[in-house]
Image: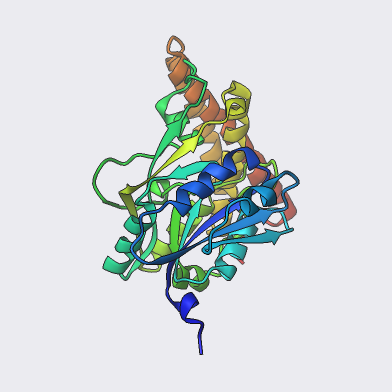
Amino acid sequence: MPDPQISAIRISAIICTHNRDGYLGKAIDSLLAQQFDGSYEVLIVDNASTDRTREVVESRQSDNLRYAYEPTLGLSTARNTGANLARSEILAYLDDDAVASPNWLQTLWNAYQQWDKLAIAGGKVTLLWQDVSPPRWLSAGLSENLGAYDLGNEIVWIDRPGQTPRGLNYSIRRSFLEQVGGFDRNLGRVGKNLLSNEELHMTELALSQGWQVAYLPDAEVAHHVAPDRLTPQWFLRRGWWQGISECYREQLAGRAGLPQISRGTERLLRGIYRSLQHWNHPAQRFDNFTYAYGQLGYLQAAIVGMLSGKGDRSS
């Protein structure tokens, strides 16, 4: 017979972490302090950390807190490990440098109970600036690279991948995740690279298969802005990897080949043109320049894919 404690767990809160012991404690504490009507668990997946991650977890005593070590580096790998170890149908992922609002899990749980075709849901993300201030060259659009996400104060049904909830505040129904074979390891961060778009890929799969994706404003979290990210170099690097990620996502969807060269070139020229248009406005100028720079990463990945014969990653 199934363990009654396991079957009673309604939702699993999962943190996948890699060398973030300075932030991790606050993230865990925000989950242990959830105002939730029922049983839930908090699972920490230590993704090959070499810092004090395990000590941070073990210093917090709670019956619903568990620790697991995943030696293979990669966010998608760690997320799949968390899903395999979790003991509930609803999986809620929080970044290791984020802080969940007290009703985060309850809001997510209620939504999945109300809509049985809801596959993916996430909420508003605000930024915690700590001892730094936003630089004058940082636009609202580029702030999204730091995790900011706000579609308003009403529930929004997502109908295109570009609006998908942020991975730092992200939940998914287990049955859907198993249906699509888990998070794709071709996408998502591995070590210091900034591959992304695994959430966009999931939204594309969900919508194409008749599932629903939702933005829930009350499922709010706050995300720490690391000071080392507030440099033009970091945003350019982030833009470069965003371009590579978008190229890979298209290849997974079977949209590889020469059309990628055309799309990337058109977007590169558009970004350069708009950057020149906004020359006297530092934030908009840098926003468009970063966008253009990202298309170079996109084009490089597309060309490499074509030359290697691996452009179609859908198989």
Location of residue 314 (image quadrant) = bottom right
Q: Where is residue 38 in the image (x, y as percent from the top left)?
A: 37, 67
Front one among 267 and 234: 234
- Image: 154 above or below 61: above
Number of numbered callouts drawn: 0
Q: Mark yes or no: residue 114 visible.
A: yes
- Is residue 314 visible from the viewing direction of this image? no
In the rendered image, the residue lying farthest to the left is 154
Give the image location of residue 263, x and y in percent: 51, 41
Q: What's the residue at 36%, 55% (across, down)?
A: 35
284 and 46: which is toward the camera: 46
Left or right, residue 43 beside residue 172: right
Does 263 appear above or below 284? below
Residue in front for this viewpoint, 257 or 197: 197
Q: Where is residue 210 in the image (x, y as percent from the top left)?
A: 35, 68
Q: In this view, does 56 lie to the left or right of 221?
A: right
82 sits left or right of 275 in the view: right
Q: Quadrant of residue 118?
A: bottom left
Which residue is farthest top? 280
Q: Where is residue 220 in the image (x, y as percent from the top left)?
A: 37, 45
Residue furthest out toward the bottom: 1
Colour scheme of the picture: rainbow
User: Could you say which is closer to the camera, residue 3 or residue 211?
Assistant: 3
Figure quadrant of the C terminus: bottom right
Q: Residue at x 73, y 43 (%)?
A: 51
